[in-house]
Image (cartoon, rainbow, N blue to C red):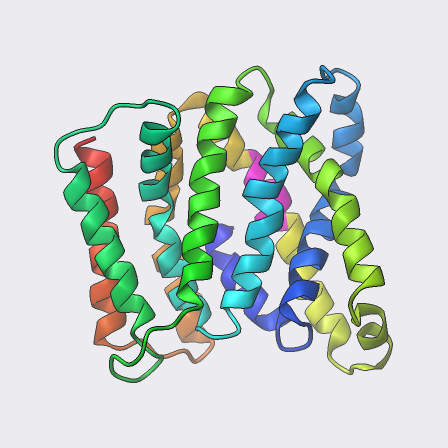
Amino acid sequence: MWGTSFILIKQGLKVFTPDEVGSLRVASASLFLLPLAMVHVRTLNPAAYWKLFISGMMGIFIPAFLYATAQTRMDSSVAGIINTLTPLFTMMVGAIVFKQRFRGYVIIGIILGFAGTILLSLSRSGSSVTGFNNFTLLIVLACLLYGSNLNFIKFSIPELSAPAITSVSLMLIGPFAFVYLLGFTGFTEKMETHPGAWKAFGFITLLGFMSTAVATILFNKLVKIATPMFASSVTYLMPIVVVMWGVLDGELLNTGHFIGMAAILGGVYLANRWR
């Protein structure tokens, strides 16, 4: 589900701006899970609301805008590959903020993973290594937020279920997305005038329903029953999915992309295997 999100963002960007894609993604996911949120909201302690709001901002709202913006300057397959940095940031945040212990080849894994990211940021689709792509840093920031949120869910709100965390978080951040989408973008006008608007709208709402709402519930459930590091390791499989969709959509990968991808996966493996 998450591997497919990058090609869906790409399709949505053919019509909508990055902020329209991000806000529509969050708004549609919030609307989809609103009935579930209304069930759980009655059972929550008032003190949990601010934690769920923070979780929603870190794990859903801000990354939605970061990924959409980054993909205006890079292929969806490359964006998905860089996302495999999430386990490294999960481990780093867990060690620094939540005092989780790690040792062995973890440092080597971190260095190797970042080296792979730098190589990917220097590679262009179908060409050789060129200048640094600053938009790579947006996805790196999103990975940092994901890693922070995983640890936050595990250690700060352990008493809440995955459906409660996801649905209520979306309920709290959803109004911000709706207000921004309808009041500060050209979304409404595009829906009325652009010939491809409804098709792009379908891609982004599918992104919100599947890759944000459903996938986040499943992922938060995994965090609850395992460790944050293990849960974040689902990103091992993402390059396979994102590259498959990218190639089917005509994207070209060069040697630098494959070397960078191998370095990131190798770094994540070392950090996870020897932590």
Which one is nearer the viewer's eye here, 123 or 194? 123
Magenta stretch: helix, strand or loop mostly: helix
Q: Is residue 167 visible?
A: yes
Instruction: Tell me: residue 100, above or below residue 31.
Output: above
Magenta-colored span: 210-217
State which quadrant residue 151 falls in: top left
- Outermost residue, left direction? 104
Residue at image position (22%, 39%) is: 271
Give the percent coordinates (x, y) of residue 48. 67, 21
- Outermost residue, front direction? 96
Residue 223 lies in magenta, yes or no? no
Instruction: Tell me: residue 261, above or below residue 172.
Output: below
Give the percent coordinates (x, y) of residue 241. 41, 58
Q: Is residue 244 visible?
A: no
Residue at image position (78%, 57%) is: 180
Q: Left or right: where does residue 129 sit relative to residue 60?
A: left
Q: Left or right: where does residue 97 sit relative to residue 174?
A: left
Which one is nearer the viewer's eye here, 241 or 233? 233
Residue at image position (75%, 45%) is: 174
Q: Quadrant of the C terminus?
A: top left
Give the percent coordinates (x, y) of residue 177. 74, 52
Residue at image position (46%, 55%) is: 3
Instruction: Tell me: residue 242, above or below residue 148.
Output: below
Give the percent coordinates (x, y) of residue 194. 79, 81
Total labels drawn? 0
Q: Left or right: where does residue 113 sit relative to residue 224?
A: left
